[in-house]
Image (cartoon, rainbow, N blue to C red):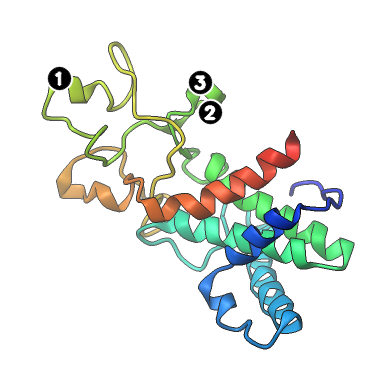
Amino acid sequence: MAAPHAVVQPSPVRRRVLIIAAVPAAAKRCKGGAARRRSAVAGTATSADNRGGAGRGYAAGVRGYWWGSNRAIGQAGLNCLVAAELADDPAARARYLAAAEEYLHYLNGRNLIGLCFWSNMKPFGAENSVMVMFHSWVGSAGSKEGQRYIGEGEGKIGPFPGMVVGGVNGNMKRYVNNLDWRQNPWEFNEPCITYQSSCASLLNYFGLKAR
């Protein structure tokens, strides 16, 4: 489990961004003012915290792994961040931040398949990151030029870096690392735009904090 973080004071803009980024389920329950908003976000984050943590090993703690599971990972982590920013209790804040970081660790490669779900991250220190993406720009195997962006090895440059793919689907170990249409690769390695916002916000929070 990640070590507790020191309490930091976010800028007003950063606080508003985190609050707006709360998952829809929490937002719908926040119509009764600030107190209910805090309670709703904290309740959702507590649920995410209880399903995660060191006791679950490499499991990310979401309810299931379906098409686009990494979106759920990012949203769960982001919800914990929102709860941390709204928390008045330092112990609760530290707990939520630690939980959020666990979800980020999962995306970065601490998962059952040992894969960093951000694309082409070897130049940035990831030994095993996504190098095959179902994407019209970098996933065209029908041409010699297109094949340069698929995988790694001699003559390859791989996909553009820093995109989050859908992730495991069906169970925590089921992932398709190719573009064989018979295996529905789009369910696993497509970098859908809806996966990016929550995961990037989660990474950005800890990235800015470490500077």
**Mark 2 or 1, which is nearer the eye?**
1
Which disc number belongs to residue 82? Answer: none
**Residue type of the residue flagged with mark 1:** Lys
**Residue type of the residue flagged with mark 3:** Pro
Q: Are marks 2 and 1 in contact (CB under 8 Å)?
A: no
Q: Earlier in the sequence, mark 2 or mark 1?
A: 2
Which is more toward the observer, 23 or 105?
Answer: 23
Left or right: 128 in relation to 86? left
Which disc number belongs to residue 123? Answer: 3
- Callout 2 crowding tier (Cα within 10 Å): few <14, some 14–19, many ≥20: some
- The residue lying furthest to the top in this view is 154
Kind of element beneath mark 3:
helix
Q: Which residue is mark 1?
A: 144
Cα distance in 3D space between marks 3 and 1: 24 Å
Q: Which quadrant, please, contains the C terminus? A: top right
Q: Residue at x 25, y 20 (%)?
A: 148
Residue 195 against residue 48 in the figure, above or below: above
